Image (spheres, rainbow, N blue to C red):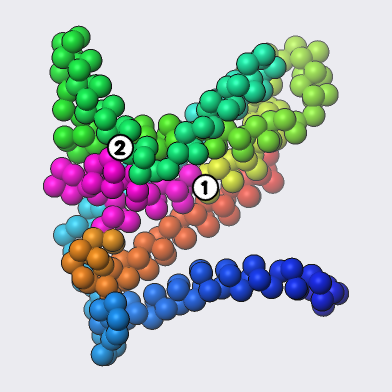
């Protein structure tokens, strides 16, 4: 670092300044306010861990946290399976590969709120009409129960993010030396054996990146949750991000909302960093 010239720091300085002002300063202030009776404008006293104790006693926070964890587990698995599957499909030298890549990636360009309202129309109106026409009761009343609301959120998230995860896997799949694949074919290895012993180990770094991105994204979803179910019915599909926003801005409990946000941040950080650590070790073993 000492050998870097002035121009290096002149170019890096604005980015570091913006990062500090937008990320680190608000983070430190948020942690500080979580130990006070902050009302959004000022605080009068320090109250220690009272906000954190209240957060864990809150009837909405722990159910929202559990719902978010279940959602994250399901979406992380499905997104990585779908992303890798789509990547394998569009790297098979098909004539329509470029077109398929564009089609699969396009949903990621649409905002979460818009996607939520689009899929809300599909689940409520389209599914209902199809169910009535075919006599399938399971397609009627979507988003009206906790179970269908959960799977509605999963479907929306996978449809939006699968193409983005596909791009990450494509980058690693296309970097695999073809000599290895051809040598395995000559030795008589079938498609599954080539994938298990060559492709899978060489795309291991992609799993680390994709798992980190899907984990962090699944935990912090808010706009899709807001527009698709708005936490209903009876807050049973409410995720942690929405619970924090409601606590801070609907109930005017700013300090309590900040304490919930700090707890949420710690949980996500621990899970994400643990995942990265073990996946990095696994990359070395492979």
Circle 2 Cα neighbour tier, 10 Å, few/some/many (<14 / 14–19 / ≥20): some
User: What's the magenta region?
Assistant: 214-243
Q: Is residue 24 visible?
A: yes
Say which residue appears at 68% left-offset and 36% top-offset: 171
On-image quarter of the C terminus: top right
In the image, is 165 to the left or to the right of 285?
Answer: left
Vertical arrangement, residue 257 with respect to residue 286, above or below: below
Vertical arrangement, residue 233 with respect to residue 127, above or below: below
Closer to the eye: label 2 or 1: 2
Q: Which residue occupies the foreground of this view, 262 or 160?
A: 160
- Residue that mark 1 sits on: 213
Vertical arrangement, residue 212 with respect to residue 104, above or below: below
Q: Is residue 239 magenta?
A: yes
Say which residue appears at 22% left-offset and 53% top-offset: 63
Q: Tell me how far mark 2 sits from mark 1, CA to CA.
A: 24 Å
Quadrant of the rendered structure where residue 251 is? bottom left
Quadrant of the rendered structure where residue 124 is? top left
Q: Which residue occupies the foreground of this view, 239 or 222?
A: 222
- Residue that mark 2 sits on: 117
């Amino acid at each position: 670092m000492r050998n870097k010239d002035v121009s290096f720091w002149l170019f890096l300085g604005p980015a570091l300044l913006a990062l500090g002002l937008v990320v680190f300063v608000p983070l430190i202030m948020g942690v500080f306010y979580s130990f006070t009776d902050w009302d959004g404008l000022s605080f009068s006293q320090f109250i220690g861990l009272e906000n954190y104790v209240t957060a864990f006693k809150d009837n909405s926070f722990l159910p929202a946290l559990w719902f978010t964890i279940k959602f994250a587990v399901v979406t992380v698995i499905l997104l990585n399976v779908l992303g890798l599957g789509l990547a394998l499909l569009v790297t098979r030298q098909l004539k329509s590969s470029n077109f398929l890549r564009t089609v699969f990636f396009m949903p990621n360009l649409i905002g979460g709120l818009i996607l939520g309202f689009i899929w809300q129309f599909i689940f409520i109106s389209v599914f209902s009409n199809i169910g009535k026409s075919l006599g399938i009761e399971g397609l009627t009343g979507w988003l009206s129960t906790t179970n269908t609301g959960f799977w509605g959120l999963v479907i929306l998230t996978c449809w939006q993010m699968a193409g983005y995860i596909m791009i990450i896997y494509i980058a690693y799949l296309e970097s695999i030396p073809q000599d290895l694949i051809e040598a395995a074919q000559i030795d008589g290895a079938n498609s599954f054996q080539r994938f298990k012993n060559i492709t899978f180990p060489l795309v291991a770094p992609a799993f680390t990146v994709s798992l980190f991105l899907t984990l962090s994204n699944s935990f912090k979803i808010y706009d899709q949750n807001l527009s698709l179910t708005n936490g209903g019915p009876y807050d049973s599909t409410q995720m942690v991000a929405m619970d924090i926003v409601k606590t801070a801005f609907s109930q005017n409990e700013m300090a309590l909302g900040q304490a919930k946000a700090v707890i949420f941040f710690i949980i996500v950080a621990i899970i994400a960093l643990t995942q990265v650590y073990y996946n990095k070790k696994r990359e070395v073993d492979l």
